[in-house]
């Protein structure tokens, strides 16, 4: 889909005898927005059409409610010059403009696209100064997102007629439009990989997609992949406990985006970083894949260096299919468990969007990819494994697997000494019960990270809600035979899952956890990935880059 800013409205097409044939009247459509008081948005730019618009509002009893439409197909032409073809006119209601938010703008955008995509090749949307920059960006992104489709496996694919969208608005909004286009590129990749079935999208597939991005943006992105042997050498046995039931090898994919500086992720001194790994034989090369961990030279040896070039790390749960393992899930809707890699899909998409936007910031994206399957090699309920940081975990439920792959990944990525770590996961059904599909849950140990995420949520319209992380919930994770267990009982399931992850974050490390179990995909007959929270992440990273 092509989308551009324009300063011009479409013109009436006039056909002249013995001259070149005029464009078909079905090629273009002018979209006019009208509020619930029948005010025409961008009216000053529509003076040539005002009489026609007002007449159409009057004869159609148009109310201007959000999503309401009426069309003037302009079939008759001018009575005196029957060869003249006026452009089509589509009125779209926007409701109360004081109540504009992302949900309303999405409804308006979806209405515009669905009303025109089968009829005309281009539309011109008259906006004028009706939308401030933030709402303009949301509207543009929603228009683009409305054009997304995933029908590659259908033998017959419907190709939309609509290919071009022109937005009549201030030229100063061009940066906001360009940013929306970058976010759309990343969000589309997220939806593509999440919509793929489990027999196509498995851990190696995710690694391939990351490597394809690195090949496309070699000046910005490098990718490293750790396999199961390397993870075993690092002591990442929580991660491996999930992967061991499947014939598909688990993969930890590390995507290093250098938008600001060439930060180092290698170390020449591997003493501190490999002390627990027991690297031997061919795995000695593993030391080169471990990021450097430095300590500031200050009077307080426990104070770490503050580094403006330190990356922000995004960690995505990438369970490419979640059967539940030995604690197998019910059969109904189990097909939707292909979406359980929605966290890693969103990190992959965010990295692509970053490369498109070329934001001046350093970011590491970690995709913790495994397939959770039942087999003779699968982890059993009651098994005890040790995480990379030395904590022993009693696995009481193999369907609480996402937190296990994230635990070891959180341990690993702290070697980057990041400004902040944000993990994102389709983690708990309890989160769906708590928040449904409107807001993602956020848990954090750092007020600044929490504030920045909430600000990005408000600006992007990709909504989150702050959830508690009180120490009192940690008691639910106590195990009589291990350091902790991987489930905390029936109550506060989303909270205890976050508490579990917090055990693998070092003291003083800024961290947040996003549970997107209710927002990563839509269920039912029209099941599909949403691409969230790519808009949230991109707004957060843009704001972070602007503050430096």
Image (spheres, rainbow, N blue to C red):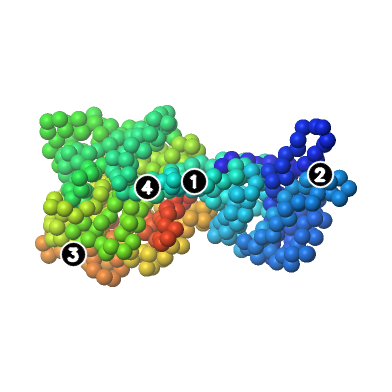
Mark 2 lies on residue: 84
Q: In terms of sequence position, does the residue under pointer 2 or pointer 3 come before the other?
A: 2
Callout 4 environment at 10 Å: few (<14), some (14 to 19), or many (20+)? some
Residue at 42% x, 28% y: name it: 219
Disc nearest the viewer among 2 and 4 = 2
**Residue 427 coordinates in the image, percent (x, y):** 32, 58
How far apart marks 1 and 3 lie (CA) works out to 53 Å
> What is the secondary structure assignment of the residue under circle 4?
loop
In the rendered structure, are the residues bearing label 1 and label 3 in contact, judged by CB atoms less than 8 Å apart? no
How far apart marks 2 and 4 lie (CA) works out to 48 Å
Mark 3 lies on residue: 478
Q: In terms of sequence position, does the residue under pointer 2 or pointer 1 come before the other?
A: 2
Disc nearest the viewer among 4 and 1 = 1
> What is the secondary structure assignment of the residue under circle 1?
loop
Q: How many marks?
A: 4
Mark 1 lies on residue: 157
């Amino acid at each position: 889909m092509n989308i551009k800013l324009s300063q011009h409205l479409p013109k009436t097409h006039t056909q002249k005898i013995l001259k070149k044939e005029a464009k078909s009247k079905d090629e273009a459509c002018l979209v006019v927005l009208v509020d619930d008081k029948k005010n025409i948005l961008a009216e000053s730019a529509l003076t040539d059409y005002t009489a026609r618009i007002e007449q159409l509002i009057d004869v159609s009893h148009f109310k201007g409610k959000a999503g309401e439409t009426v069309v003037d197909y302009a079939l008759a032409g001018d009575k005196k010059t029957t060869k003249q073809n006026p452009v089509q006119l589509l009125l779209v209601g926007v409701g109360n403009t004081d109540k504009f938010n992302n949900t309303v703008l999405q409804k308006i955008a979806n209405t515009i696209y669905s009303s025109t995509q089968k009829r005309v090749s281009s539309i011109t949307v008259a906006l004028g100064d009706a939308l401030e920059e933030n709402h303009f960006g949301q509207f543009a992104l929603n228009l683009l997102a409305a054009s997304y489709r995933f029908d590659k496996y259908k033998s017959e694919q419907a190709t939309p007629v609509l290919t071009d969208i022109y937005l009549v608005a201030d030229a100063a909004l061009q940066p906001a439009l360009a940013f929306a286009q970058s976010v759309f590129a990343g969000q589309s990749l997220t939806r593509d990989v999440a919509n793929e079935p489990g027999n196509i999208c498995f851990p190696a597939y995710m690694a391939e997609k990351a490597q394809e991005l690195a090949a496309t943006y070699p000046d910005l992105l490098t990718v490293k992949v750790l396999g199961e042997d390397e993870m075993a050498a690092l002591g990442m046995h929580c991660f491996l406990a999930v992967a061991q039931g499947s014939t598909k090898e688990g993969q930890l994919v590390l995507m290093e985006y250098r938008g600001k500086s060439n930060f180092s992720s290698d170390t020449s001194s591997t003493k501190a970083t490999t002390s627990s790994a027991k690297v031997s034989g061919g795995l000695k090369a593993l030391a080169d894949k471990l990021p450097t961990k430095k300590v500031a030279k200050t009077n307080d040896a426990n104070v770490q260096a503050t580094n403006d070039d330190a990356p922000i790390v995004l960690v995505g749960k990438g369970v490419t299919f979640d059967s539940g393992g030995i604690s197998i899930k019910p059969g109904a809707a189990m097909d939707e468990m292909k979406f359980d890699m929605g966290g890693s899909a969103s990190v992959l998409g965010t990295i692509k969007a970053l490369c498109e936007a070329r934001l001046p910031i350093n970011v590491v994206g970690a995709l913790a990819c495994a397939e959770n399957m039942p087999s003779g090699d699968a982890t059993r309920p009651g098994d005890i494994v040790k995480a990379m940081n030395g904590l022993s975990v009693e696995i009481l439920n193999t369907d609480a697997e996402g937190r296990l792959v994230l635990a070891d990944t959180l341990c690993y990525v702290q070697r980057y000494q990041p400004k902040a770590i944000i993990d994102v996961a389709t983690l708990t059904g309890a989160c769906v019960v708590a928040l449904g599909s409107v807001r993602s849950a956020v848990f954090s140990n750092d007020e600044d990270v929490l504030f920045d995420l909430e600000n990005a949520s408000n600006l992007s319209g990709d909504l989150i809600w702050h959830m508690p992380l009180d120490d009192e919930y940690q008691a639910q994770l106590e195990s009589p035979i291990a350091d902790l267990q991987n489930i905390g009982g029936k109550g506060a399931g989303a909270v205890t899952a976050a508490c579990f992850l917090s055990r693998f974050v070092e003291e003083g490390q800024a961290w947040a956890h996003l549970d997107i179990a209710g927002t990563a995909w839509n269920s039912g007959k029209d099941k599909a990935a949403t691409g969230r929270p790519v808009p949230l992440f991109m707004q957060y990273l843009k704001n972070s880059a602007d503050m430096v």
